[in-house]
Image: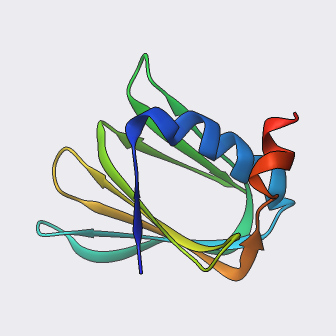
Amino acid sequence: MAKKLEKSQWSVYFDLISRALGGKRAEIEVASLELGDQIEAHWLPFFGISYDPKDDVISLVLEGHDHLIHKPREIYIEGEGLELSSLEVIDAEGDRHIVLLRDPLMLPAPSAAKAR
């Protein structure tokens, strides 16, 4: 079941994800009413994700491909316990940017993340 991330959590959560990635492979799919479903990146090494509140943009960095999401409205994460299997970002236009991880990402325990 997907869990909604509050906007106040985005930067900290994305920093946590980026530290744990280690080049794990990801696929990015964009679904919109205007264009339909499109694969933007197909199982490329995933190096990082960040949120810039000043410009209101999420940046996903994969090997040979950067994907920007302007004016994100909502973010949902999918996984069990400390595993992350996918995340979905809905932008201001209602487009859905879906990031699937080939193998679930094991995130550090919350207490370990705060110690950094």
- Measured as percent of width and height from the top left, residue 24 is found at 79, 69
Residue 101 appears in view: yes
- Measured as percent of width and height from the top left, residue 64 is found at 70, 55
Q: Looking at the image, which is closer to me, 50 or 37? A: 50
Which residue is drawn at the image coordinates 51% and 40% (left, top)? 10
Task: Give the image quarter of residue 41.
Answer: bottom right
Image-based side of 72 in relation to 49, left or right:
left
Considering every residue shown, the one lying at the far left of the view is 34
- 18 versus 38 height, above or below: above
Q: Looking at the image, which is closer to me, 83 or 30? A: 83
Where the N terminus falls, by quadrant? bottom left
Task: Give the image quarter of residue 73.
Answer: top left
Q: Looking at the image, which is closer to me, 79 or 28? A: 79
Residue 41 appears in view: no
**Image label count:** 0
Image-based side of 32 in relation to 100, left or right:
left
- Measured as percent of width and height from the top left, residue 96 is found at 30, 64
- 64 versus 69 height, above or below: below
- Which coloring applies here? rainbow
Which residue is drawn at the image coordinates 74% and 71% (left, top)? 105
Which residue is drawn at the image coordinates 51% and 39% (left, top)? 9
- 83 versus 55 height, above or below: below
Considering every residue shown, the one lying at the far front of the view is 111
Q: Looking at the image, which is closer to me, 70 or 11? A: 11
Image-based side of 106 in relation to 102, left or right:
right
Which residue is drawn at the image coordinates 12% and 69% (left, top)? 33
Where the C terminus falls, by quadrant? top right
- 3 versus 42 height, above or below: above
